[in-house]
Image (spheres, rainbow, N blue to C red):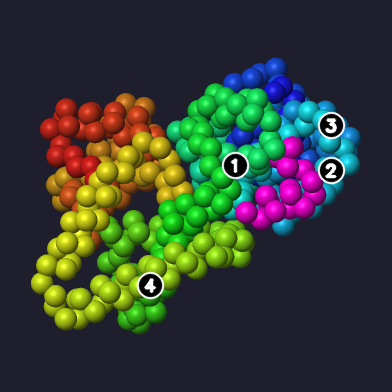
């Protein structure tokens, strides 16, 4: 594969284009976007060689075309691409739900030309301006080939994903949608519901919001995701989400009954089982709920203590993503929370601060 096409060029599409350019500088990359400004930005960044605001025969020369728009738009792209496809051209997408796109591919008779794709990575930011090849590093990248997709092409795509620094995993599109419903789609709904539960039960003085930290902020962080994107996901993967959500509601009802009855040992067994399973999950790869690189530091309650930490890290060229005092210590050790962009920066900071006799804590 040496010629690539992109239809839409936002955060994920732009990041993949940049990653391809990084691992294959000689690749030819052409992109479609609605706005010429996006194409100009991508050209200036060296992510693409050619930009266009129309979908035409140029895309028929591509080895692999990435569909990087919402599902409904990608379906229209498929219809527009069908007349211009060459025999060699393969199509993929980057959507987090695969059933709908596979159905459209089959309806259009494009099964031999399609391998679904889902890079399980992203950011709270959007648009090409925030694209980066680093987004893909150590992220699972799921491939969902059709039954008619050529085996050698699947192998080439698999190899490309590895070269870009991601972790390829091949699943059927049905298994993909069930798995992602469990580990991503339902958790986002749960986080949103929990955030709204606290909002609805807070006092006029917003005391709950004031002291919210630790566990609450961790579990509700993904409630800040894009409403447009998550409505689209819920409308696309409805059956899997509802089935798993119903099971979750049943488990909550069981917990409620046991707690109300003061059933001795129930919550102990619940947390013991959940702790064992949660602790067995590896932290290294990024997933739909992304890893946070943070540590907690004990500092004296005196003027300049926080600034001293920031200065030490800055002098060591360690970039800080966020830093602040922990006001709710129920779930945290250390009065100062420092968050970093990368795992390597976290490790370097911990080593530096411990070497200077600071008490530093990390959470799994």
How many badges with numbers are in the image?
4
Quadrant of res 341 = top left
Residue 249: give its label. Answer: 4
| Mark 2 and mark 3: Cα distance apart in space | 9 Å
Q: Work out which residue is located at the far left of the displayed protein and give it.
A: 264
Note whether 329 is above or below 360 in the view shown. Answer: below
Assess whether mark 1 and mark 3 are in contact (beta carbons under 8 angstroms).
Answer: no
- x 25%, y 56%: residue: 274
Dot 4 crowding, Cα within 10 Å, few <14, some 14–19, many 20+: few
| Mark 4 and mark 3: Cα distance apart in space | 49 Å
Dot 1 crowding, Cα within 10 Å, few <14, some 14–19, many 20+: many
The spot of residue 38 in percent (x, y) is: 73, 42
Q: Secondary structure at mark 2?
A: helix
The spot of residue 351 in percent (x, y) is: 22, 29
Residue 144: give its label. Answer: 1
Q: Secondary structure at mark 4?
A: helix
Q: Secondary structure at mark 3?
A: loop
Earlier sequence position, callout 2 versus callout 4:
2
The spot of residue 344 in percent (x, y) is: 35, 29
| Mark 3 and mark 1: Cα distance apart in space | 21 Å
- x 56%, y 35%: residue: 132
Note whether 137 is above or below 76 in the view shown. Answer: above
Residue 15: give its label. Answer: none
Q: Is residue 135 left or right of residue 14?
A: left
- Residue numbers of the magenta segment: 99-114
- Camera-nearest residue between 255 and 228: 255
Residue 82: give its label. Answer: 2
Dot 3 crowding, Cα within 10 Å, few <14, some 14–19, many 20+: some
Earlier sequence position, callout 4 versus callout 3:
3
């Amino acid at each position: 594969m040496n010629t690539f096409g992109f239809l839409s060029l936002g955060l994920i599409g732009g990041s993949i284009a940049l990653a391809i350019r990084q691992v294959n500088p000689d690749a030819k990359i052409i992109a479609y976007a609605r706005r010429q400004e996006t194409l100009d930005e991508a050209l200036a960044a060296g992510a693409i060689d050619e930009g266009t605001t129309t979908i035409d025969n140029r895309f028929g020369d591509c080895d692999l075309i990435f569909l990087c728009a919402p599902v409904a738009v990608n379906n229209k792209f498929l219809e527009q691409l069908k007349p211009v496809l060459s025999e060699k051209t393969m199509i993929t997408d980057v959507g987090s739900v695969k059933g709908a796109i596979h159905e459209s591919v089959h309806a259009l008779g494009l099964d031999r030309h399609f391998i679904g794709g889902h890079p399980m990575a992203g950011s709270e930011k959007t648009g090409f301006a925030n694209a980066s090849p680093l987004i893909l590093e150590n992220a699972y990248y799921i491939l969902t080939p059709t039954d008619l997709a050529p085996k050698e092409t699947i192998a080439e795509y698999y190899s490309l994903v590895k070269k870009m620094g991601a972790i390829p995993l091949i699943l059927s599109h049905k298994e993909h949608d069930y798995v992602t419903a469990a580990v991503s789609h339902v958790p986002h709904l749960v986080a949103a519901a929990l955030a709204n539960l606290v909002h609805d039960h807070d006092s006029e003085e917003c005391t709950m919001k004031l002291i919210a930290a630790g566990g609450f902020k961790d579990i509700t962080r993904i409630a800040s995701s894009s409403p447009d994107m998550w409505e689209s996901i819920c409308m696309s993967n409805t059956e899997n989400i509802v089935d798993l959500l119903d099971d979750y509601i049943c488990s909550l009802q069981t917990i409620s009954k046991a707690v109300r009855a003061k059933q001795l040992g129930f919550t102990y067994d619940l947390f013991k089982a959940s702790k064992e399973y949660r602790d067995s999950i590896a932290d290294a790869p990024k997933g739909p709920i992304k890893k946070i690189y943070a540590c907690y530091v004990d500092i004296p309650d005196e003027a300049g203590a926080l600034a001293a930490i920031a200065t030490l890290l800055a002098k060591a060229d360690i970039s800080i993503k966020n830093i602040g005092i922990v006001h709710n210590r129920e779930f945290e050790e250390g009065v100062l929370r420092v968050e970093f962009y990368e795992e390597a920066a976290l490790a370097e900071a911990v080593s530096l601060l411990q070497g200077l006799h600071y008490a530093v804590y990390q959470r799994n």
